[in-house]
Image: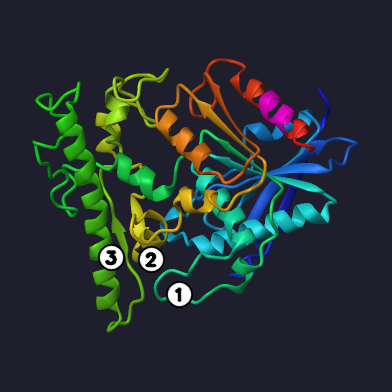
Amino acid sequence: MPQIVREFVGLPSPAVGRAGAGGHPCQGIYYRPAGLHPSTAFIATHYNVDFSEHYLAPLLAERGYGFLGWNTRFRGNEAHFLLDHALAEIGVGVRWLRGQHIERVVLLGNSGGGSLMAAYQSQAVEPVVRPVTGMQPLAAADKLPAGDLFVALAAHSGRPEVLTNWLDPSVMDEADPLSVDPDLDPFNPANGPPYGAGFQARYRATQRARNERITDWALGQLAALAASRARDRLFLIPRSWADLRMIDPAIEPSDRRPNWCYLGEPAKANYGVYGVGTVSTLRTWLSMWSLRTSQCTAAPHLARITLPSLVVHATADTGVYESDARALYDGLAATAKQLVFIRADHYLREPEGARADAADLIAAWVAASGG
C-alpha cells in the first residue's frame, strides 16, 4: 500500500472568525498518497461527530484520492447547531480543496452527514436555507462552491426524521424522564414485540405529535424570552432510542441484529443519558430537530441535486433501514444515480473487510464517473 500523507488543516469560520485561544473553529485532516497530488478529493462532514479521522480516509487515499475529513465548529457541540453556519463552514473546506488544485470534489454524506452534505450542495446550487428565528442571515452561506459528485453512505433521511422515528412516544411529561404511558410503552410486553399494525400506526402518530409538542413549546419559550434578558435556553429531550424497528426485526426485515441499536439494547439505551438531540437550545431544536421548522431534512435538498450520485446502504445497519436508502435514491434529481447494497453494519466494522470493500466500490464508481 502507498504511504499516506496526513496534513492538519485549520481555518477560521466566516461566522465567528478564530478562537481567542488561537484555535481554528474549522478543522480537519487531509489525506493523500505520498508523492501524488490527486485531482479528485472527497470531503466528509457530520452535524456533530468528528470526521477528521474518518475510517474511509486512509482507504480512499490508498486508492489514489484525496480525502478531507472536515469538522465545523459544531463537532461535539450538537446542542448549539445552526444549519446555515455549518454550511458556510463546510464551504471553507471545499474552498481549501479547490486551492489544492482539486478539480473534482466528491461530497461524501455518511450517516447523519448524508442530509447535511445534501443540504450543502442544495444551498450551493440555489440558496434557500433561512436563518433560524431571531438570527441574522450569514452572507457566506449564500456563496458556496458546489461539489461535482455526491455519495450517501449508510445515510439517514434527515435529522428531524431520525429523531422522531427514534423518540419514545410514551413519555408523558418532558420534565420527568421516567414518565410512561403503558399503552404506548414499546418495552411493555403487552404491546409486543411483535407489534400489531394498529399499535405501530398509533405509535408513529404519537412520535410525530411529541415532536410537534416540543416545537410548540420551543416557539412559546422564545416568545417569552423576548421580554427578558435571555435570548435562548438549554433543555433536555429524554428517551430517544425507541424506534420499533430496533426492537422488532419483523418490521422492515434486514440483516441487522435484533433488539439492538447503536448503543446496545434499546431498553437500556433509551433510559440512558446518551442520545441524539438529548441536549438542545430552543433555536437548535428549530434549526435541526423540528419536523415543522428544520431544514435538515434531506428530501427538499436532494430534489436540487443533479450531480452523478451514489447511494450505498449497509443491510445490517441497526439505525438506517432500506426504506431510508430508497427514499434518498428516489429523492435525488440526478439522472446518473446508483443504489448499491452491501452486507455490513452501520460503521462497516463487520464483517471483516467491509470497509475495504466499500472503498473499492466507491473508488470504482468515482473513476467510472470521470473522477
Q: State if disc 2 and disc 1 touch (CB < 8 Å).
A: yes
Q: Where does the image place residue 171, in percent across and percent down from the top left?
A: 17, 45
Quick check: can you spot residue 276? Answer: no
From the viewer's perspective, tell me whether residue 286 is left or right of residue 153.
left
From the viewer's perspective, tell me whether residue 178 is left or right of residue 75.
left
Residue 83 versus residue 185 in the image, above or below? below
Q: Where does the image place residue 60, in percent across and percent down from the top left?
A: 72, 32
Name the residue beneath numbered marker 3. Answer: 218
Q: Where does the image place residue 80, in percent across and percent down from the top left?
A: 44, 61
Among numbered discs 1 and 3, the one appearing first in the sequence: 1
Looking at this view, name the residue that lies furthest to the right.
35
Range shown magenta: 359-365
Q: Where does the image place residue 302, in percent across and percent down from the top left?
A: 53, 48
Name the residue beneath numbered marker 2. Answer: 283
Going 24% across and 30% down the picture, which residue do you hit?
267
Looking at this view, name the residue that lies furthest to the bottom.
227
Which quadrant of the view contains residue 182? top left
Question: What's the residue type where badge 2 is placed?
Answer: Arg
Question: What's the residue type where badge 3 is placed?
Answer: Ala
Instruction: Compare residues 22 and 292 and report the one nearer the observer.
Output: 292
- Distance from disc 2 to disc 3, alpha carbons, whole Å, reads 8 Å
Going 75% across and 43% down the picture, which residue do you hit?
41
Name the residue beneath numbered marker 1. Answer: 135
- Secondary structure category for the residue under label 1: loop
Question: What's the residue type where badge 1 is placed?
Answer: Met
Quick check: can you spot residue 100? Answer: yes
Q: How is the image coloured?
A: rainbow
Query: Pointer 2: residues within 10 angstroms few (<14), some, or many (20+)?
Result: many
From the viewer's perspective, tell me whether residue 105 is left or right of residue 279.
right
The dot on residue 209 is none
Going 86% across and 35% down the picture, which residue do you hit?
34
